[in-house]
Image (spheres, helix red, strand yellow):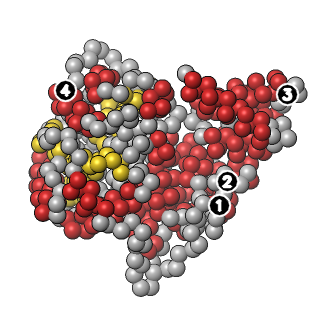
Amino acid sequence: MPKGPSSPPHPDVEQWLAWLMAGFGDGVLELRVFPQREKSVLTGYFRTPQAAAKALAPWDGRAQIYAGLNPRIRKVWRQAPDMLRLLPKSGNKAVVAAIHHVLLDFDPERPQGVPSSREELERARDRAKTVAAWLKEQGAGDPLAVSSGNGFHLLYKIPPQDPQTFPRRLQAFLRDVARRFGGDGVEVDQKVWDAPRIVKVGGTISIKGTPSKDRPHRRARIAQMIPPEPDEGMAALILRYDASTPRASPSGARAAPPSAQGADPEAVAQLVAPYWTPGQRHTLALGLAGLLAKNGWPEDKATEAVAAAARAAGDEEEHDRIRAVEDTYRGLAEGKEVAGAALLEGALPPQVFAALSSLVRASRGNLPKVAPITALRAIATASLPPSVQRFLENPPRNPVQRRAALVGAIKTLQAAGYTEAAIRMILAQHARAFPPRMLNAVFAHREEGHNAG
């Protein structure tokens, strides 16, 4: 917890949260807090805007504070009920109940690592006004407008949409808006289409970048409040975009390798997340994007892998990492030389790079949902917690004792951030000691106990 007494939440915070959560129904709000001088990330799930505002108040001005744009399913609330705590994993698209909002994020071009100047902020605001007027001509209503501290946000509440199919239409829509209105010193963020997207909480102070007299840290202020009613016109506008249309490649572009339709982004993220450290993050994002692109991964799966690695490592520059993926795929489509393995080889330990390369090569064509065991064999023992290493090297002979110890090992791995898929891959190397039926029974028992709690 931050030191010293905390003030009540700023009025804009409560107003913004109440607007966002209107219509959530049984869904809950996800908050994520990135403390300024700590690597850890705090996550919480909240049923009311009042509880969320109270929990984040001590961190306002001491951390970057974000909220999930869309409601999470009710059962995740038990993981951090109306409180902030360390969680091994969050931001999973599988827990998004429905798409409730569309975000347009206008970011002014400025020197790296500093907040926006007043002139840059006004430039973003003016571009946002232009886009809002254009959208109204297309049939959309008025947005909730927020000066985000370093840029400008337009938020549209829409009738709930399918989180599996709607994001692709939203991606096409954002690409079109960026094409029409991006440039001249303002970027329209095209990365805010995914279902688990987080956004700066309105009313909180943006502490991103090193401040100065002309470039201070600013509070994200609500510039225009509207009733929290679903905008049918905005939803209809986005639904006109065809999510199935592939991006056209210019003549002379390189032919793409076979698509890795069954690729597992979580398995890739699990391999690289432990090495996703400050000073290496941008290099890893570019290298991983290049490696996946050259091996036929669709852009959305590569984005998911890079974003999952960034989240697992507590990287608050997730937007920049996703931007690296899009830049890489655009360059490859244009026939440019794209780095991949060369960057990763210098950033990862040899055994990790070998395992990652093996996993990605296996994805050419049709990678199974659970990655090949050989992909983790080189690093499984070296990277596991010591207690789990000892258990795997010498499991109890007695089946009852072995199962009890297995429950403890799985709990330790989950606390360390390993997904169920990754745990199964590790234990599959010891299938004689831990046959699939035993693993299925243990995971089913843990899930039943979690639901009962």
> Label 4, label 2: how many angstroms apart (C-alpha)?
47 Å
Q: Quadrant of the C terminus?
A: top right
Can residue 373 be seen by looking at this rendering?
yes
Is label 2 in contact with label 1 (beta carbons under 8 Å)? yes
| Callout 2: SS | loop
Q: CA distance from mark 3 to mark 1?
A: 33 Å
- Nearest the viewer among 299 and 310 is 299
Question: Is residue 240 found left or right of 250 in the rendered image?
Answer: left
Image position of 326 (left or right of 215): right
Along the polypeptide, which appears first: circle 3 or circle 4?
4
Q: Which residue is mark 4?
A: 10
Q: Which residue is mark 1?
A: 367
Kindly report which numbered mark, 4 or 1, lies closer to the viewer in this rendering: 1
Tell me if mark 3 has few (under 14), some (14-19) or many (20+) residues whose alpha carbon lies within 10 angstroms of its own: few
Of mark 3 and mark 2, the one earlier in the sequence is 2
The residue beneath circle 2 is 371
| Label 2, label 1: how far apart the Cα atoms are | 7 Å
Crowd band around label 1 with a 10 angstrom C-alpha radius: few (<14), some (14–19), many (20+): some
Residue at far bottom of view: 251
Residue placed under numbered mark 3 in the picture? 399
Q: Secondary structure at mark 1?
A: loop
The mark total stands at 4
Q: Residue furthest top?
A: 5
**Disc 2 packing (10 Å; few <14; some 14–19; many ≥20):** many
